Each structure stands twice: as C-alpha cells, then as structure tokens.
Image (cartoon, rainbow, N blue to C red):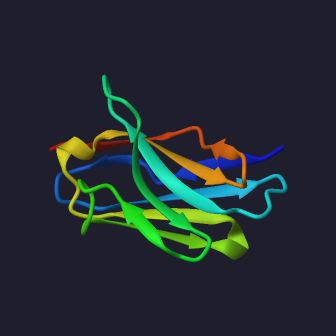
Amino acid sequence: QVQLVESGGGLVQPGGSLRLSCAASGGIFSINAMGWYRQAPGKERELVASIISGGSTKYADSVKGRFSISRDNAKNTVYLQMNSLKPEDTAVYYCVFAAPSAYWGQGTQVTVSS
C-alpha cells in the first residue's frame, strides 16, 4: 500500500523559512509528477508547485521567487523550500504524486504568524 508521509511544517514568523518533505513508500513506481497543494481555512485547495519527471517546474504566481520545489527520485521524495513566508501562506500543505494514479499525503500545517 502506497503511503506518502509529510514533514517539516510548523509555526514560523513572517519572513522566515520552512522546508517541507514528502516521502513515498509501499512500492510506488513510475512517478510522472509530484506537487504541493495547500488549503487555507474557508478557501479551496490550490496548486502551489509541481515538478515533472523531466525536472520542469511550475509555481503559483503567489509563490514565485519565494518557493522552490525539488525531487530526489532515488528516495521517492519531493521537497518544498519556502522562503520569505507571509501570513497569507498559512494553510495545510498536501503533497501529491501522480504515478499515474494520484496519491496524497495527510497534510502538514504551516502557520506564519508573529
């Protein structure tokens, strides 16, 4: 059974940084794409960043220049480096793998507050 385990969330002050990790286990193969979504209270889930097998990346306009997505294929792990965090980045962050079915992590809370 495939499982995605996220880590790295927490409370950070505005302007700070966090690094999220998401590791897959359970025999996942042929991962086509990896991504991070987030959902703030009262809002719809939105795509934050994605990376495909060739390494190309995409970002939501709201995080461009501040967030960076990367992957370690050998470890079946995807990362999200978040810099210059803002209060509006506060949300539950979810990782997703497309292999080709979609597998979701359980979510990790990121809170940006002074």
Near-viewer residue (69 or 107): 69
Q: Which x, y percent locates residue 72?
A: 62, 73
Is 24 drawn above or below residue 40 in the view shown? below
Return the residue found at the far top.
42
The quarter in which the N terminus is drawn is: top right
Q: Quadrant of residue 91?
A: top left
Q: Which x, y percent locates residue 70?
A: 50, 71
Q: Residue at x 17, y 52 (%)?
A: 14
Q: Which x, y percent locates residue 73?
A: 67, 73
Is 102 drawn above or below residue 84 in the view shown? above
Q: Which x, y percent locates residue 41?
A: 32, 26
Count numbered badges in the picture: 0
The quarter in which the C terminus is drawn is: top left
Q: Residue at x 71, y 75 (%)?
A: 74
Is 17 drawn above or below residue 41 in the view shown? below
Q: Is residue 89 left or right of residue 15?
A: right
Q: Residue at x 32, y 55 (%)?
A: 60
